[in-house]
Amino acid sequence: MIWRSTALILAAFLAAGIPVSFGPELLTALGLGEFAFVGQLGFAILVLSGLEAVFGRLPESRAGH
């Protein structure tokens, strides 16, 4: 169903945006502020990889097929 896949994509963008926005503050607090850009990319990849595993375990909807 198109609404399900759209909702999963929006959830992935939201979930990846949260660590990207807080990544520089976390890295600065750890004394790694010079790695903020690379850290943001790493956090986004880590979150999206976890979401891929979670979304892969969700049951598929077969309604209307």
Image (cartoon, rainbow, N blue to C red):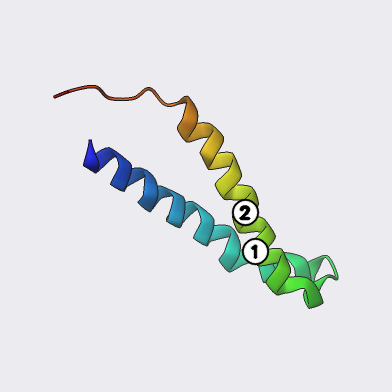
Considering only vertical position in the picture, is 11 above or below 43? Answer: above
Residue 32 image point, x, y percent: 83, 70
Where does residue 14 sit, x and y in percent of width and height? 44, 56
Report whether 33 appears left or right of 25. Answer: right
Quick one: 30 or 64, which is closer to the camera? 64
- Other residues around mark 2 within 10 Å, as few (<14) / some (14–19) / many (≥20): some
Crowdedness near tag 1: few (<14), some (14–19) or many (≥20) residues, C-alpha within 10 Å: some
Q: Secondary structure at mark 2?
A: helix
Q: Residue furthest bottom?
A: 34
Identity of the residue drawn at 52% across and 39% down: 52
Residue type at mark 2 is Ile
Q: Are marks 2 and 1 in contact (CB under 8 Å)?
A: yes
Residue 49 in the image, given as x and y percentages of width and height: 59, 44
Left or right: residue 14 versus residue 52 is left
Question: Residue flagged by tag 1: what amino acid is it?
Answer: Leu
Q: Give the quarter of the figure containing the C terminus.
A: top left
Q: Which residue is mark 2?
A: 45
Residue pictured at 59% horizontal, 49% vertical = 47
- Residue where numbered disc 1 is placed: 41
